[in-house]
Image (cartoon, rainbow, N blue to C red):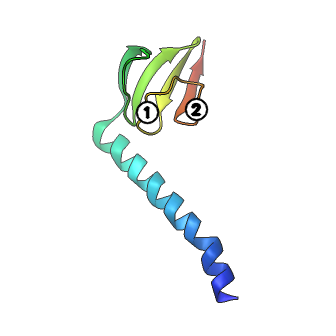
Amino acid sequence: MGDIVREAVEPLHVRIAELERQVTDVNERGLRYRGVHQRADAYRTGDCVTAKGGLWICLRATSDAPGDSADWQLAVKG
């Protein structure tokens, strides 16, 4: 039973560590508005952009467009 519990809990520890890192990044940098999303730009955790009629917050480093991946969270829909 111990191995089954360990296998179930380990992915949660990894996910929690990633979320803690993201929160630390945002707390240290704060949110930063970068204007209208530009395809050629790379974005970091806490960057905010306007795209597709809304304001999006970057959850982790990405060059994907808002709404195209889980790297972005829609904050405000216009």
For the C terminus, the quadrant is top right
Q: Residues within 10 Å of mark 2 (few under 14, many from 20)?
A: few
In the image, residue 36 above or below residue 3 = above
Residue type indicated by callout 2: Ser
Rendering coords of residue 25 (x, y %):
34, 44
Residue type indicated by callout 1: Thr
Q: CA distance from mark 2 to mark 1?
A: 9 Å
Q: Residue at x 60, y 79 (%)?
A: 6
Total numbered labels: 2
Mark drawn on residue 8: none
Secondary structure found at label 1: loop
Mark drawn on residue 69: 2
Contact (Cβ within 8 Å) of mark 2 with mark 1: yes
Secondary structure found at label 2: loop
Residue 8 or 22: which is nearer the viewer? 8
Q: Residue at x 29, y 43 (%)?
A: 28
Rendering coords of residue 66 (x, y %):
54, 24
Residue 68 sits in quarter: top right
For the N terminus, the quadrant is bottom right
44 horizontally vs 66: left or right:
left
Q: Residue at x 64, y 88 (%)?
A: 2
Rendering coords of residue 32 (x, y %):
34, 26
Residue furthest bottom in the image: 1
Residue at mark 1: 62
